[in-house]
Image (spheres, rainbow, N blue to C red):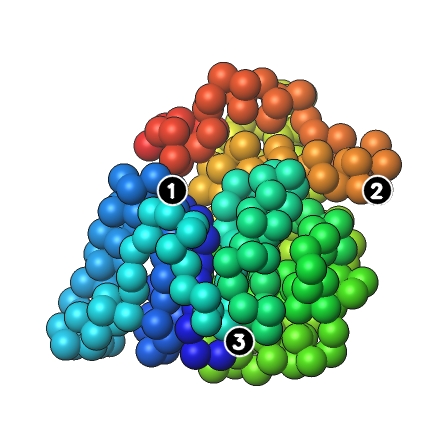
C-alpha cells in the first residue's frame, strides 16, 4: 500500500486523510465541493497546530504531513495507480454503489476498495467488478485520536484483502478488530440502541437532557453522555443507522424514536447545525 485516496472530505474523511498523511502515505483527498475540501485541509492544519503546541510534533513535521495531502474536486482526476480507495461519503447505500461503480473504470484492477460506512451491509455494497477486493474499514471519530478500526468482511471479501488491510491498520498505530458482515457491525449495533433509548427516555419525560447524560457519565463512567454524543455524531447519521438496523433485523427494538425523526426533519442535527439536544 503506497498510494491512498479518501473520497469525502467531511469529519470522517479529513480525519482518515490526516492519519494516513501522518504516517507518510501520499493521500488524495477528494470531494466535489471545493469549500468542504478547503475546510477539511484547514481542520487538519489546526489539529496539527494543537500537536505542535503540545510539543508532540514540531513545525517541520506538521508541514511534511500537510505536504502528503493533495486536494482534488473531481473523481475523474484520481490517480490510476492508487492502491487503496476509502469511501467516506454520505451514509446512503445508492450513493455509495454509484461511486464504486464509477471508480471501477478509473483505477487499476488490483486496487482495493474500502468503505467507512457505519452500518450498511458490506456484501450489499460489493457489486463492483472486484468484490473480493472490497472491505469495510470503519474508523472511529475523532479518527486521529481513536485507536479502533472495525474491519468488516463481506461475503466475497478475500482473505488476501483482509490480511493486507489488517497489516495496514497496524502501520497507522491503530487496533483492527475483525467483524463479520451484519447490520451495524459491533460498534453501532451496541451504541445506537443505547443512544436511541436515551432519546426515548427524554421523549417520555423520564428525565432532562442534562440528567440523562449525567447518569451515564457519573454512574456508568462514560466520558460523554449519550445525548451529547448523538449531537457530535450528527442526529441525521444516528437516524440513518437506526433505519439500517430496523430494516436489517426487522425487529421493533431498533425502531427509531419519534423525537429523533422530528429533530432531523427540523434540521436540528447536533453540533454541525448549531443545535441538537444542546446548543453550540
The label nearer to you, 2 versus 3, is 3
Residue 125 x/y as whole percent: 69, 51
The residue at the point 49 percent across, 37 percent down is: 234
Residue 109 x/y as whole percent: 60, 69
Label ID, residue 249: 2
Does the image show residue 50?
Answer: no
- 48 sits left or right of 117 in the view: left
Say if 122 sits above or below 164 in the image.
above
Does the image show residue 264?
Answer: yes
Mark 3: few/some/many CA within 10 Å (<14, 14-19, 20+): many
Q: Distance between the residues labelled 2 and 3?
A: 30 Å
Q: How far apart are marks 1 and 2 (CA)?
A: 34 Å
Q: Is mark 2 on a helix, strand or loop?
A: helix
Q: What element carries label 1?
A: loop
- 242 sits left or right of 49 in the view: right
Residue 186, picture quadrant: bottom right
Mark 2: few/some/many CA within 10 Å (<14, 14-19, 20+): few
Say if 174 sits above or below 220 in the image.
below
Pick the front one: 232 or 120: 120
Residue under numbered circle 1:
32
Residue under numbered circle 3:
169
The tag earlier along the polypeptide, 3 or 1, is: 1
Q: Which residue lies furthest to the left in this view?
A: 59
The residue at the point 54 percent across, 32 percent down is: 236
The label nearer to you, 3 versus 1, is 1
Residue 20, picture quadrant: bottom left
Residue 133 x/y as whole percent: 66, 68
The residue at the point 72 percent across, 68 percent down is: 132
The label nearer to you, 1 versus 2, is 1
Amino acid at each position: 500500500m503506497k498510494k491512498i485516496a479518501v473520497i469525502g472530505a467531511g469529519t470522517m474523511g479529513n480525519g482518515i486523510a490526516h492519519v494516513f498523511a501522518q504516517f507518510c502515505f501520499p493521500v488524495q483527498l477528494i470531494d466535489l465541493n471545493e469549500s468542504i475540501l478547503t475546510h477539511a485541509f484547514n481542520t487538519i492544519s489546526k489539529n496539527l497546530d494543537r500537536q505542535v503546541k503540545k510539543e508532540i510534533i514540531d513545525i517541520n513535521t506538521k508541514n511534511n504531513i500537510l505536504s502528503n495531502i493533495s486536494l482534488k474536486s473531481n473523481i475523474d482526476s484520481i490517480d490510476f495507480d492508487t492502491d487503496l480507495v476509502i469511501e467516506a461519503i454520505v451514509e446512503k447505500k445508492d450513493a455509495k454503489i454509484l461511486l464504486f461503480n464509477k471508480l471501477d473504470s478509473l483505477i487499476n484492477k488490483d486496487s482495493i476498495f474500502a468503505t467507512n460506512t457505519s452500518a450498511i451491509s458490506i456484501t450489499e455494497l460489493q457489486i463492483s467488478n472486484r468484490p473480493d477486493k472490497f472491505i469495510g474499514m470503519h474508523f472511529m471519530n475523532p479518527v486521529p485520536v481513536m485507536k479502533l478500526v472495525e474491519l468488516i468482511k463481506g461475503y466475497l471479501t478475500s482473505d488476501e484483502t483482509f490480511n493486507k488491510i489488517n497489516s495496514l491498520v497496524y502501520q497507522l498505530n491503530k487496533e483492527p478488530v475483525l467483524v463479520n458482515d451484519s447490520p451495524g457491525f459491533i460498534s453501532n449495533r451496541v451504541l445506537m440502541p443505547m443512544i436511541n433509548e436515551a432519546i426515548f427516555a427524554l421523549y417520555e419525560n423520564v428525565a432532562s437532557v442534562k440528567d440523562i447524560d449525567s447518569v451515564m457519565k457519573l454512574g456508568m463512567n462514560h466520558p460523554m453522555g449519550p445525548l451529547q454524543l448523538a449531537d457530535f455524531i450528527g442526529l441525521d447519521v444516528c437516524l440513518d443507522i437506526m433505519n439500517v438496523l430496523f430494516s436489517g433485523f426487522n425487529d421493533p427494538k431498533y425502531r427509531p424514536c419519534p423525537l429523533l425523526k422530528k429533530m432531523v426533519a427540523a434540521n436540528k442535527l447536533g453540533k454541525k447545525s448549531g443545535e441538537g439536544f444542546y446548543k453550540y
